[in-house]
Image (cartoon, grey):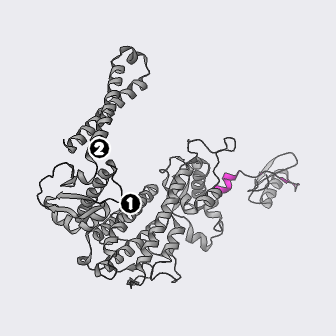
């Protein structure tokens, strides 16, 4: 070996060994031993690489000289590495640091797991299961791979890496990109005010709370809730879960719910309500990009550089301050809009169950109780997202059930969906009866099988259990079909 720290030992003519900091020191020891100056030969080998690596925290900073870099950067705070070299490297750095500097080189050791293939096997050429990061980056993008590695496991545990997961995170990057394009398009010429009182923390100015819709207050509160949770998780070194929380918030809440709900107010582009919603769209997007930046640096930088008021400024999102308390948490808004969401989800589920075409708008009656004012105020959002016919929607504190209607008891309300708007009642009765007959045949077959003592005693336990589970599922399905048939009436 030629690369590394050469062993500081020299040998005399008879093989006697003399260690020294340098050849002169070894020669002095040899002279004292032999009583004269002799020729010495240094050991040709080098110390193992872990010895050299163990000196890394301080040797790279100029040690043993007391350099400014050593004084500034040693000891450091965090070491991030794999658990497989805990003894080989981490322990040796700590021991070397204590021996040569009197200080441990870092206060926190964060151990990640090993990246394995999707079956949990170690990647190797012999198995032909190696995923080259450069190939993955070329196909899916740097951010997609980075986000997958950050969120794909838990501290210290191995992760199973598959291209399916990387592709899903590429879709996440695309989702954010497309959402940002929509927002930036809606923000053009809107004269949004930016607060630059802190040059490293620009913030879009929010309107008075009286100008905010329930959806506006909800997304601001959800942002603050997620910001707090991400802070907590990062402090606890749960980096993967922090990334997953941001994924859920941006994809499901900001993109799928808030952006869609915002379109109701944005339709009247010149109104004060539309301007208020534009301010909220910008505020939440900009701050969310800062939270996401460590996980997906490239797409967040590209979007941030194109936000109104920030485009062309020349600064980077990387040096912007990490978001702090926004003061926007609103438990009431989260509860009330959560009820609106639950109502919409359930109406969508019924539409799906009855195969109602997406283009068809349907009637809905809301027996809303104490939530009648909230439903009425947010009816345009409900109508748009649940695909209802506005003229066929009724909202009241108390409302009698119409005949032949699907009934939904959700979120403290009862919602009736008249079936005549959903389906051909006669055809649906025939379809359900045919399915009931089919389920009955399967139930009879499985009951007969399970009643056979020979089958139960001789068949593998897993097979018997599978049949029992299937029987339970069929009985549950039959009960659902009978309920559906009862809803249809005679």
- The overriding secondary structure of the stretch rendered in magenta is loop
Check disc 2 and report the residue beneath it: 428
Q: Say which residue appears at 43% left-offset and 81% top-offset.
A: 188
Q: Is residue 179 visible?
A: yes
Residue at the spot 50% in from the left edge and 64% down from the top edge: 174
Q: Residue at x 21, y 62 (%)?
A: 393
x and y percentages locating residue 272 in the rendered image = 29, 81
Between 216 and 317, which is closer to the camera in this rendering?
216
N-terminal label among 2 and 1: 1
Provide residue 486's location: percent of width, then percent of height: 20, 41
Q: Is residue 45 magenta?
A: yes
Label drawn at residue 252: 1
Q: Which residue is drawn at 33% across and 18% down?
A: 451
- Magenta range: 35-54
Q: In this view, does 93 lie to the left or right of 408?
A: right
Q: In this view, does 147 lie to the left or right of 359?
A: right
- Local crowd at mark 1 within 10 Å, few (<14), some, or many (≥20)? few
Looking at the image, residue 465 lies above or below residue 218:
above
Q: Please state the total of marks drawn on the protein image.
A: 2
* Callout 1 secondary element: helix
Question: How far is mark 2 from mark 1, CA to CA?
Answer: 33 Å
Camera-side residue of 109 and 168: 168
């Amino acid at each position: 070996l030629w690369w590394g720290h050469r062993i500081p030992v020299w040998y005399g003519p008879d093989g006697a060994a003399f260690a020294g900091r340098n050849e002169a020191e070894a020669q002095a020891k040899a002279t004292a031993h032999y009583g004269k100056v002799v020729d010495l030969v240094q050991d040709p080998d080098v110390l193992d690489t872990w010895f050299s690596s163990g000196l890394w925290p301080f040797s790279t900073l100029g040690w043993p000289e007391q350099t400014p870099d050593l004084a500034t950067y040693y000891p450091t705070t965090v070491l991030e590495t794999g658990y497989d070299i805990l003894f080989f490297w981490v322990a040796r750095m700590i021991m070397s640091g204590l021996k040569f500097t009197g200080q441990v080189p870092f206060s926190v050791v964060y151990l990640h797991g090993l990246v394995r293939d999707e079956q949990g096997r170690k990647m190797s050429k012999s198995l032909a299961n190696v995923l080259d990061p450069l190939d993955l980056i070329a196909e899916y993008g740097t951010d997609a791979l980075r986000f997958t590695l950050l969120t794909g496991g838990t501290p210290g545990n191995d992760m199973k890496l598959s291209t399916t997961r990387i592709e899903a995170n590429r879709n996440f990057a695309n989702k954010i990109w497309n959402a940002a394009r929509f927002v930036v398009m809606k923000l053009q010429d809107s004269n949004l005010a930016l607060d630059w009182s802190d040059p490293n923390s620009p913030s879009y100015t929010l309107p008075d709370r009286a100008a905010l819709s329930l959806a506006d207050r909800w997304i601001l509160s959800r942002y603050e809730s997620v910001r707090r949770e991400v802070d907590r998780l990062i402090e606890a070194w749960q980096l993967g879960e922090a990334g997953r929380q941001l994924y859920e918030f941006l994809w499901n809440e900001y993109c799928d719910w808030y952006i869609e709900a915002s379109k109701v107010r944005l339709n009247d582009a010149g109104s004060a309500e539309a301007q208020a919603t534009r301010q909220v769209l910008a505020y939440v997007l900009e701050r969310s990009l800062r939270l996401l930046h460590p996980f997906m640096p490239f797409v967040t930088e590209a979007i941030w550089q194109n936000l109104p008021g920030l485009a062309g400024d020349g600064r980077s999102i990387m040096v912007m301050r990490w978001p702090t308390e926004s003061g926007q948490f609103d438990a009431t808004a989260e509860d009330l809009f959560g009820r609106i969401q639950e109502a919409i989800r359930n109406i969508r589920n019924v539409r799906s169950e009855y195969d109602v075409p997406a283009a068809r708008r349907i009637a809905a009656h809301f027996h809303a109780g104490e939530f009648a004012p909230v439903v009425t105020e947010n009816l345009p959002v409900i109508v748009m997202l649940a695909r209802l016919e506005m003229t066929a929607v009724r909202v009241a504190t108390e409302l009698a059930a119409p005949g032949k209607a699907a009934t939904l008891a959700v979120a403290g309300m009862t919602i009736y969906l008249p079936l005549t708007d959903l389906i051909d009642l006669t055809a649906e009765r025939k379809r359900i009866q045919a399915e009931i007959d089919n389920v009955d045949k399967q139930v009879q077959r499985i009951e007969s099988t399970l009643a056979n003592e020979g089958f139960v005693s001789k068949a593998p336990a897993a097979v018997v259990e599978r049949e029992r589970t299937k029987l339970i599922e069929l009985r549950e399905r039959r009960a659902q079909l009978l309920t559906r048939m009862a809803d249809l009436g005679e």
